[in-house]
Structures are given as structure tokens and as C-alpha cells.
Amino acid sequence: MTDLDATTLRTTYDNQLRARVPDPLPAGVTVDRDGPLVRILGLDHGGFLTYRHLEGLTGAALDALIARQVDFFRARGESVEWKLHGHDEPADLPERLRAAGFVPEERETVVIGPVTPLAAALPVVPEGVRLREVTSRADLDRIVAMEEAVWNADRSHLAAGLEKEIAADPQSITVVVAEAGDEVVSAGWVRYVPGTGFATLWGGSTLAPWRRRGIYRALVTYRARLAAQRDRTLLQVDASDDSRPILQRLGLVPVTTTTPYVYTP
């Protein structure tokens, strides 16, 4: 599929990606359901709530669904993320989540585009930088160190989560680092979603001295080639305000937004 109509792409995204459950599940991860919600447990950074739609729930019935999640995760003593999309209904869902104690974090833009044009472009990296596929825990820990330097926040859960994904199904994910000498200066990973035409791109944080040199773009095109080798036709990214303009120049189209709403007991 290469139709770049935003509405068509959004429908494809809704039908193929939303509410999907990893198969096989990483070690320690379990899934259950509460009505339309898919509840993913055992992640290294708290629970996760996703859904294709809310089956028309509104008013008191929707408030009761939200309240059950608060009670459930309060009892577990862990945080949970409700992934809200900009086109979700009802329109007052954000207000109802906030009223229940969920706090919105930074909004991102869902962008989608065809794999083929990007896969045809050779990754161009600055002199002294190389791209390398990695699987070892030592390399994943180096990615964490880079991420923590970029964001000045704890990212320790990232290495454990990626390690479990790779162990569960090494064919479903590829992690790529950009290195200058012995230093990881950027990193990204690509997930090949089974049973769909999608590959999804994640990561892309880059150390400040190495930004605006084309490393992020090179990581995108490198991972697009990996996706093409696995017969994927569409790339999807939850893009920050920094990466969205780059991705749009590469041909990806904004189709909706996504905002993490996080409840912390």
C-alpha cells in the first residue's frame, strides 16, 4: 500500500497496529482485557493500556472503566500509561482521564509513509560515524547511557525491555547504534509487526554535539532498508516535534497525534 491520503493511512494504522499484543510475549509480560481495553502488565516501566476504540462508551460507563484501571494499578502499586490518540472518541476523554488522576505527557505526531523510497536511499553518515546492528546487553547498556545523557533522566528500563524483546523473538526487532569511536552518539530500533505491512521506528535520540549532521536521517533510511528486506510496505513513527519535520521531508504523512496519559499511585 502506498496511498498517502492521511485518512486512509490512519484507518490502516487503526486496523493493523492499535491494540496489538506482542506474540510471543517477552519474559514476564502478561496481557488481560477489561472491556475494550487491552491491559499489558509486567513491563519494566509500569503497565500499558491500549485499544482499537472504546465501543461507544460515554459518561458514567466510561468513567467506571477508567476508575477500574486506577483501582487495579493502585492495588499493584505501579504506574500505567493510557495511550490516547487525537481522533479517539468521545471528545471529552482527555478531561475524564485528568479527572481520574491521569497526567498528560508530551504529545507526539503519528506519521506514516511508504518504505520503498526510503529503502532506495543509501544511509549517509558523517565522517567518523558508523551504523552497527547490536544485540548484546553491553551494547544496550551503552544505549541507555546515551539516552540518559540526552534526557537527563533514568532510562535504565530500556536495556532490560529491549533485551527481553530480542530474546523472545530476535526476528521481530533490530537495534541499530550510531557510533563515533567507542561512543554511542545515537540509536534507534525497528519492529517488524507480524501480520501487517508495517515496520515501526523507535528511538533516535542523539547526543547534542552530533545533532544536525544527518545521523537521524541515516538511521531512518538504514532501518527502512531492513524493513524492505522483510517485505514491509509502510513505516510508522510516533514523532516528536524535533523529528517530525525531518520525517515529513522524507515523505511520511501526519495522520493523528498520540499523548501518554500516566497514572501514578
Image: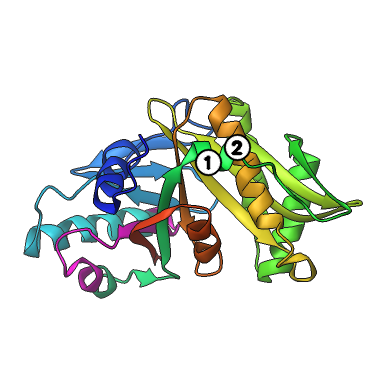
Q: Which colour assignment does the render follow? A: rainbow
Q: For this rendering, which residue is in front, 71 or 245?
A: 245
- Indicate whether residue 255 is drawn in magenta: no
Q: How many marks?
A: 2
- Indicate whether residue 80 is drawn in magenta: yes
Q: For this rendering, which residue is in front, 58 or 240?
A: 240
143 sits to left or right of 253: right
- The residue where tag 1 is placed is 117
Q: Position of residue 26 (x, y in %)?
A: 53, 32
Is residue 264 among the parts visible in the rendering?
A: no
251 sits to left or right of 140: left
- Element type at marker 1? helix
Report the quarter where the N terminus lies.
top left
Is residue 78 among the parts visible in the rendering?
A: yes
Q: Residues within 10 Å of mark 2 (few under 14, many from 20)?
A: few
102, above or below 83, in the image: below
- Residue drawn at 53 percent across, 46 percent down: 201
Amino acid on which the number 2 mark rests in the picture:
Ala
Number of the label disc, if any, that sits on residue 242? none
- The residue where tag 2 is placed is 120
